Amino acid sequence: MKQKHKIQLLKDEKWQNYEAVFSSFADYGYGMEIIHKQDSIYVMIKKVRLKERKVIKYTEKFWTSNNPSVKAWGIIENDRLIAGIETKIDNDKNPRLYVHLLWVNEEYRRQGIASALMDKAKARAKKENLRAVHLHTWSCNEHAIAFYLSEGFKLIGFDSSRFSNEDIEKYNVPLLLEYRF
């Protein structure tokens, strides 16, 4: 799909602390079962229908990190940010690019904008000779998971009790996804 919106590098002075409102819903989530045996651990993650629709709504701000490697791109229309992606380089011995947030305003979804923004992140990682792009999303975020899988990301891990001891039952498990070069 031809991108009709111009993506530009966002300057942090103007967009610092810009609050992106994430809103979606889920009819499906990724259920998880972890079985410990004497010499093995089995993990089953399976897409299942939720008992009731889960409404997902939260805010995330751009440039909350002081990491000097933070870069963000976005689409601005009428001096209003309608979509954006923020990335930063992990400071480890084998650096990867971390996608802190990827957001598209509801009225602009399904136009290829998220893919175009993700292409910016992948291009940055390649240009800077990083080995991968990684991110996280929640096990209830069926639409984001489908998008990331379609972009070539693979599951590399999860945190089954990040927020509570009931994260698995609440479909609130952070899934770690990665796109490798």
Image (cartoon, rainbow, N blue to C red):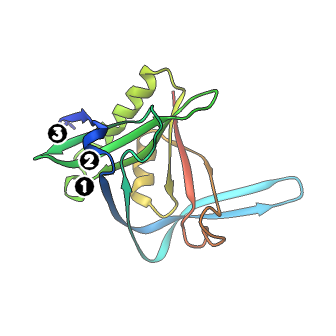
Q: Position of residue 105 (x, y in %)?
A: 25, 55
Q: Secondary structure at mark 1?
A: loop
Residue 37 horizontal side relative to residue 86, left or right: right
Of marks 3 and 1, which one's residue comes earlier in the chain? 3
Q: Position of residue 131 (x, y in %)?
A: 54, 27
Residue found farthest to the bottom = 51
Identity, as a three-letter code, of the amino acid under mark 3: His
Q: Quadrant of the N terminus?
A: top left
* Proximity of marks 2 and 1: CB atoms separated by less than 8 Å: yes
Identity, as a three-letter code, of the amino acid under mark 2: Ala
Q: Which residue is mark 3?
A: 5
Q: Nearer the viewer, residue 96 or 140?
A: 96
Q: Nearer the viewer, residue 89 or 35?
A: 89
Of marks 2 and 1, which one's residue comes earlier in the chain? 2
Q: Which residue is mark 2?
A: 83
Instruction: Give the spatial CA distance, label 3 vs label 1.
Output: 13 Å
Callout 2 crowding tier (Cα within 10 Å): few <14, some 14–19, many ≥20:
many
Q: Secondary structure at mark 3?
A: loop
